Amino acid sequence: MKKGLIYEGMVESVDFPNKGCVRVVSDEPEDNGEKVVVKNAIPGQKIRFMVNKKRGGKCEGRFLEAIEKSPIETAERCQYFGVCGGCTYQSVAYEEQLKIKCKQIEDILSEVITGDFGFEGILGSPVHTAYRNKMEFSFGDEEKGGELALGLHKRNSMYDIVTVDGCKIVDEDYSKILSCVYEYFKAKDIPYFHKTTHEGYLRHLLVRKAVKTKQILVDVVTSTQLHMDMSELAEKLSKLELDGEIVGFLHTFNDSIADVVKNEKTEIVFGRDYIEEELLGLTFKISAFSFFQTNSLGAEVLYSKARDYVGTTKDKVVFDLYSGTGTIAQMLAPVAKKVIGVEIVEEAVEAAKENAILNGLSNCEFIADDVLKALDNIADKPDIIVLDPPRDGIHPKALEKIIDYGVKNMVYISCKPTSLARDLVVLQERGYKVVKSCCVDMFPGTYHCESMVLLQRENS
Ligand SMILES: C[S@@+](CC[C@H](N)C(=O)[O-])C[C@H]1O[C@@H](n2cnc3c(N)ncnc32)[C@H](O)[C@@H]1O
């Protein structure tokens, strides 16, 4: 097979996260039956692809088009599906999406776990569309030099943006807010911040909407290269007919070169700088930049399962490491002796402290620090540890410190099963055994999925 040439093939399976395993169908006997990896393909599709990498006898291809639909593609798709980089499995029936994710995670775990790991399968999200409570839209253009766009990155593109009014993973309020902000800046011909030249003004639009309280927070992120009064836009936003209520409109300034939403300074244009969400009977204040699970109803499923894996916390000291706004800590606090949360984002820790007071919990302590450093300064010893690190998993030195506590039970929640698998190798070498495991789908339509394991110290 040759680089740059176009081939056809059948997608036989998809490895995590989105690597389609394709068997080439060709009249050329030497190509027919060859195996190629093509990202974003769906099992059962017949596709056309271009070979774009060849290394060590292995080929990778770039997806061009589906020539034949897969039998599992029976779900509705939005008009941007395939162009927008947000969703991979939107066209796949939800039950089938769950089967794909479940099998991928079971395979990853079985590669590193020795013996039975009590795999309990996958729990689905209670809602499959309009499930997100947060979106970060980017300003840009659809193609180089094109007109202003506000939306999500195009698939496989660092630069091009597709304006996604009508996106299916958020409700209509997001589309109305997006259109209002987009039309406003487009009419005024305000330039977006170019990632290559670092010139321009408009960077991101962040929208958070609580599912239970319907409170909405809108934040326009810009550079400081222009000075705009946002009160006219504020007025337009406040006149929108929404299902929820905009309780705060913020203007954040970010001059950093990195293409991330970074808070260098935030002004409140109107209202306040947080929304409140309810999970499992507890209330949480969420600010613009604190981590909070993006699917509120899915989070209730995830946290209920975590509570089940943790078991009784009565009179125990629990560590909630990588605690975000303190959701897990507070859910476990009511009968525990004490819960200590550690989180690196100060704003999230402040919110966690306020949330604990709001929920009438006096036995929670939250520390703003890197887990790696914080563990050296905590006097208490844990009975149970809950771990919910970011995508890259746990820093190897932090993992050693965590293992050194020698607790009997640990629950490890992960949004990237390959990082979990890497850390499990170390945990097993150091005497822990996976006794139960499962996945919880919090991200329908996309290839993301949460995984969770209960670890027990073998000689305890
Ligand atoms: C997957 S989130 C989990 C948050 C929380 N458990 C929840 O469910 O809402 C991971 C969190 O780890 C935090 N974090 C990342 N690196 C960290 C570090 N080195 N030390 C402490 N916290 C960290 C992030 O800011 C984020 O809030």
Image: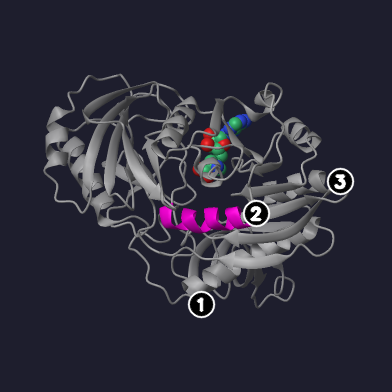
Magenta range is 295-308
Bin the neighbour count of mark 1 within 10 Å (Cα to Cα): few under 14, some 14-19, many 20 and up: some
Instruction: Name the residue carrying label 2.
Output: 311
On the image, numbered disc 1 is attached to which residue?
72
Q: Nearer the viewer, mark 2 or mark 1?
A: 2
The kind of residue on which mark 3 rests is: Glu
Which amino acid, mark 1?
Ile
Q: Position of residue 271 (x, y in %)?
A: 21, 32
Q: Amino acid at mark 2?
A: Gly
Q: Which mark is residue 137?
A: none
Secondary structure mostly seen in magenta is helix
Residue displayed at 41% across by 56% down? 83
Q: Is mark 1 within 8 Å of ligand 1?
A: no
Quick one: 143 or 26, which is closer to the camera? 143
| Gap in angstroms between the C-alphas marked 3 and 1 | 40 Å
Mark 2: which secondary structure?
A: loop
Name the side, left or right, on which 431 lies relative to 139. right
Examine the structure image and report whether residue 302 is included in the region drawn in magenta: yes
Q: Residue under circle 3?
A: 429
Q: CA distance from mark 2 to mark 3?
A: 24 Å
* Image-quadrant location for residue 357: top left
Quarter-of-image position of residue 82: bottom left
